[in-house]
Image: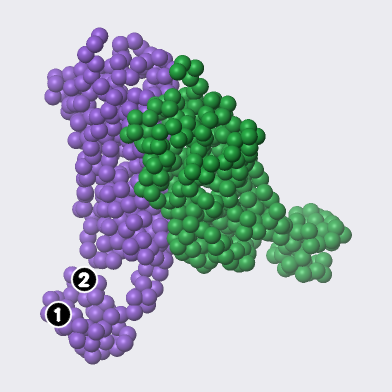
Chain colours: A green, B purple
Amino acid sequence: MTIKEFAKLLNISAATVSKVLNDSHEISAVTKKRVLDLAEELNFQPNPNASSLRRNKNKTIAIVIPEIANNFFSKAIDGIEMIAQQKGYHSLIYLTHESFTKELGIVKHLMNGRVDGVLASVSLETTDFSHFNDLLEKNLPIVLFDRVCEEIQTAKITTDDFHAGYMATKHLLDSGCKKVGFLAFSEVAYACRKRKEGYMEALKEQNIEVDDSLIVNCSNDMITNFSMINNLLKKKKKVDGLFSSAENLAILTYQICSELAINIPKDLKIVSFSNMPMASYLSPSLSTITQPAFEMGKEAATMLFLSIEKPRNNYKDVFTEMKSNLFVRNSTKRLFLK
Amino acid sequence: MTIKEFAKLLNISAATVSKVLNDSHEISAVTKKRVLDLAEELNFQPNPNASSLRRNKNKTIAIVIPEIANNFFSKAIDGIEMIAQQKGYHSLIYLTHESFTKELGIVKHLMNGRVDGVLASVSLETTDFSHFNDLLEKNLPIVLFDRVCEEIQTAKITTDDFHAGYMATKHLLDSGCKKVGFLAFSEVAYACRKRKEGYMEALKEQNIEVDDSLIVNCSNDMITNFSMINNLLKKKKKVDGLFSSAENLAILTYQICSELAINIPKDLKIVSFSNMPMASYLSPSLSTITQPAFEMGKEAATMLFLSIEKPRNNYKDVFTEMKSNLFVRNSTKRLFLK
């Protein structure tokens, strides 16, 4: 029996039956009961393939991320793919390489309806988000994770960036640092601004004034980043602690310290956002703020499938902050011998 | 002017003109000259969009790889995407997570013609390669890179695995190791078998018999791998050098040595295939065989676009071996103090 034939028996439209079966809030409780009772009586189940053909013809989701040479994203993808596999979906990964132009090209490419939903982490260069809103207007569900932004009205999964920034900075101050710098992976990205606010809050709490010359606003250009961090570190006694908002900036800092013969943790302590599996085996081992990357991926995918399966619900106010953890290792070790 | 109108002027078919413009070997030199001379005279260039619509309607290639939490693959993808971007193509990344079933599902998914070509590194579990041959029969170009195999008749880009295995093992012997073990990431994968052959060659050259109890055949199951490597290392004086064929096995070995209080390089020297950017900053720094990942990606993509653009040529005998390098660091340091 088709939905149309079933609907005729109740003298209602096929669309109404479909909405009831999708648990839409648009339908009255009375109508819902009529539909579900008869469906049970007749053991009526709409052909899942037919309905999937209509609704989700691709059984495919897109994951749009800035880079993969980053342990956070590779673990988040593992979480996403675990859920996608349970749902019988393929996932396609698209890399923006932090470029707005590439992100725009990818999102336009997705407009042709080759996927049923999109998980995205916005690129560093992106300040205009209208391409994502265009997708939403086409009724293609999007869930943002990690690199979220305020301009897109959709579900967002992120980490507690403010608190993590606060926790990292407080840990440096508690370890004896007096002049704590901040390596920002972006001046504009929402997540990085929150991390910076946490950094400033921890300083304020100990009555330390924010010194802008200790804040390095990095970008996707690693050569410029190298030279900016190098300039900060080669000024003697300028800075004795660094909170790095991204893993690759910590790697750069290890390189620079090695070249400048700066001893970590004696001359400089560092704590960084990182999901690097080798953090414990670095020389010295790196203290990290570690995001629950796998869980964030799972949560983002779960939200996306909710949006795909129950599109009439409204997920735009979903904003999930998941807890990051501080792992204290030797790069922030307090040394009592001077 | 369309190709059809242009062909009429020469009294030949549009297909012939098209073949000439695609540099097909099917057309005689005389006809080629006639077509190209007139094309130059009339400044005739076929509409690139029309031709792309016919031939490559997707402007998309697929990259099918086992995993991304691996610095080799992330750098190879950067190389692939550099070439794809120059050609105006999107690239989709599909992960098999080393599973044959997933690889099969992905390749079947690609059968529907959503991409113009496929770059693939086969999964560890794959021993039946007919799904790839099905793609080739559908005239979808495939280029294999790194994890190649003999069973698929197509262009292959790999590294000099035999020589690299020889070089790594010889380096351990030259550093004073007497009992050198081998961590195989797979017993069957072509690349790993070649690395093992190189290992055996280096032993043979120094009249050392291969001891099978020093060879650990790992798989995609990291828990089993951990326990097998742990068993090897906890036997005292069993092994004093390890050649690891994969980065993640070296990471495991560092973890195990840390737990068993085995000092690297004093008690155990290790050299591993790895593209890890942090190799120099590990404790101790890791000696590596480093593959030219970016260049291999570029080369594989270049071959794929040749296959897409000039499909009538035959690329099945292309087998490119690119040179890997040995970087000697502290994990294989010869210690003269005993």
Of B58 and B328, nearer the camera is B328
Q: Secondary structure at mark 1?
A: helix
Residue lying at 60% horizontally and 64% vertically, measured from the top left: A133
Q: State whether residue B196 is above or below residue A103.
A: above
Q: State whether residue A332 is above or below residue B128.
A: above
Q: Quadrant of the C terminus of chain A?
A: top left
- Name the residue beneath numbered marker 2: B24
Q: In the drawing, what numbered circle is on residue B33?
A: 1
Using residue B166 as the reference point, say whether residue A266 is left or right of it.
Answer: right
Of B250 and A176, nearer the camera is A176
Residue A234: name its quadrant: top left
Q: Residues within 10 Å of mark 2 (few under 14, many from 20)?
A: some
Of A242 and B212, nearer the camera is A242
Q: CA distance from mark 1 to mark 2?
A: 13 Å
Of A269 and A132, nearer the camera is A269
Locate residue B191, reporting x and y percent.
Answer: 28, 38
Using residue A12 as the reference point, say whether residue B323 is left or right of it.
Answer: left
- Of the numbered discs 1 and 2, the one sitting upstream in the chain is 2
Which of the chains bears the disc numbered 2? B
Q: Secondary structure at mark 2?
A: loop
Q: Residues within 10 Å of mark 1 (few under 14, many from 20)?
A: few
Work out whether residue A128 can be spotted.
yes
Which of the chains bears the disc numbered 1? B
